[in-house]
Amino acid sequence: MNPWFSTLTFALLLALGGLVRQPAPRRATPALSIEELSARIPICGQSHVGGIPSDVLRQPVALRTGLGAVPTPTSTKSPQAQAFFEQGMAYLHGYVLVEAARSFHEALRHDSTLVLAHVGLSRVYSQLDDTTAARREVRRAQTLAHFASGREHAHITVRLAQLRAIDELTSKSRRLAYRRALRRATRQFPDDVELWLLAGNAQENLASGRGQGSTPEGIAVYEKILQLAPDLPAAHHFLIHSYEGTKAYDKALLHGEVYARLAPNLPHARHMYAHDLMKTGQIDAAIARLAGADSIERRTYETERYKPDYDWHHAHNLTLLALCYQYQGRLAEAEVLLRRVYAMTRPGDAKWAFYTKKSYPELLLALGRSAEAEALATELTKGKTAGERFLGHYLLGRAHVQGSRWAEARREATATGAELATLRQSDPTGAVAGRLRPFSRYLTALLDLHESGNRPEALAKVRDFQQSARNQFGPDGWIEALFQLETIAELAQAASMTAFAEEAAKTLADHDAGYAGTHHALAGLARQRGDEAAVQRERALAELGWQRADAAFRKRVGLN
């Protein structure tokens, strides 16, 4: 039993009560133009925070409903400051970072001594990869400490411990010191739900964890909170991520439904529900949720007048929506979205600049437009960051495989390995390399598959890749793995590798038995066996799954 649990007393039940506060709408101060915003005073003397103009982060904001805001104790006497602070926390827990920052600044306009608003801003700025701004905000909280309650002092202490651990993310001793600070704080204030949520986050492998990791200890903390407060949105949110990490998609789906219901106007709540609708065969419902999240986000950018680029989540949501369209063979609709994503520039830490650049060239390859994909890939090989250069070489390698230029493809695969080595040296946490490594392995697997006739050990390497693809559980990784497994099954079948083609189709079915591409692969194998009944059965299921597919796609896969 985790020693923290014994201190989670009846006071927590009283503090939470399962009640969600939804403040009444308040008329917003009119949004400023970009020109007007540029004249405002910057945050902490900085013109930008995490690559976002500081004036955007300070822009006045209205109170909104449907975000899953919950009562959170502070020392303020101002109801308006309290409401905006709670709105900021709901946005923070839902990764809507610009709106979280705006809400915390609005709270400070109503009460300039609200210490926890500065702590909240510090957490936002850490998530924007701006440690300098994050430290400045917590120092501001310290200068106001004489206005703070004992509870708020505990939050400052915990935040300082977390920042020290973030400074050296690979330091086990600093991570443990952060956990000890949380243990002391939860013992002193066992009714403070935010401290308990942080305690769950702190069980992740990095001190910067914000609820996206998955550990048995973290799951235990969140589940314990929900025993006392069944309608706490953030706990449901973090459990979705946690159960996805164990591939318990049915459990994640249950929490996704609750989170979306408790916070219907929070884009990420809709998006999270879509994660596991997609993985459990409910692709139409997933598309509806992702499109709903996109609608909320675009309305916010238009109304509040700032660039979509400033919201990291927008590119992620659009990419997943496009991949779901691709799942249904709706490649033209996917292309529209992915062109938008490709044109976006992710703010903040440059090492993640590659994120928006991968999916559009890959779709061009799927559409048979190799020349366009190669042109984009060549530009990426000249990028400033190792991640961009990696993607360029990977995409060129994919294009060469498609054109049966095997020596050139092998050269590009070697180049991806060199860029991964650069990434490992520059980022000891391995976060970026970990995100990109599966694509290098996939390219190598395609080459090994081609060479398997001459090198028996090559097929074993392909199987190793297939297993690693099956282990992908994040939303992008899961569906990207599906398409990768599909390609391997198609190539094996085209090469008349009968036994391995059967095996590859089974692996594809294990990943997603309901996918139309799975049925298409099974139909092809049945045709080779001369099993006409199986051909008709599997073909009908493929037709059903691709009933909305583009005409060109249907022609390519041999459907009427």
Image (cartoon, rainbow, N blue to C red):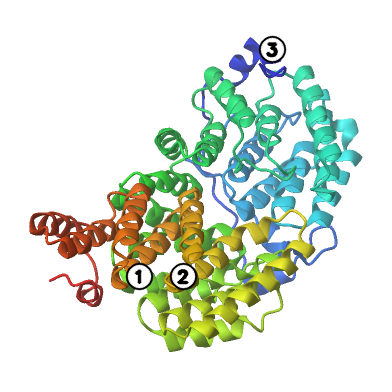
- Amino acid at pointer 1: Leu
Local SS, label 3? helix
Q: Which residue is disc 2 drawn over?
A: 446
Hey, what amino acid is under mark 2? Leu
The percent position of residue 159, horizontal first and vertical second, equals: 80, 38
Q: Are marks 2 and 3 in contact (CB under 8 Å)?
A: no
Marking on residue 491: 1
Q: Secondary structure at mark 1?
A: helix
User: What whole-number distance in Å separates the C-alpha atoms at marks 1 and 3?
Assistant: 56 Å
Residue drawn where x is 53% and y is 41% of the image: 245
Are discs 1 and 2 less than 8 Å apart at CB? yes
Marker disc for residue 6: 3
Q: Is residue 138 left or right of residue 423?
A: right
Left or right, 222 with respect to 275, comes to right
Question: Around disc 2, counting alpha carbons within 10 Å, would you say few (fewer than 14), some (14 to 19), or many (20 or more)?
Answer: many
The x and y percentages for residue 347 are: 66, 66
* Residue 153 higher or lower than 544, as above or below: above
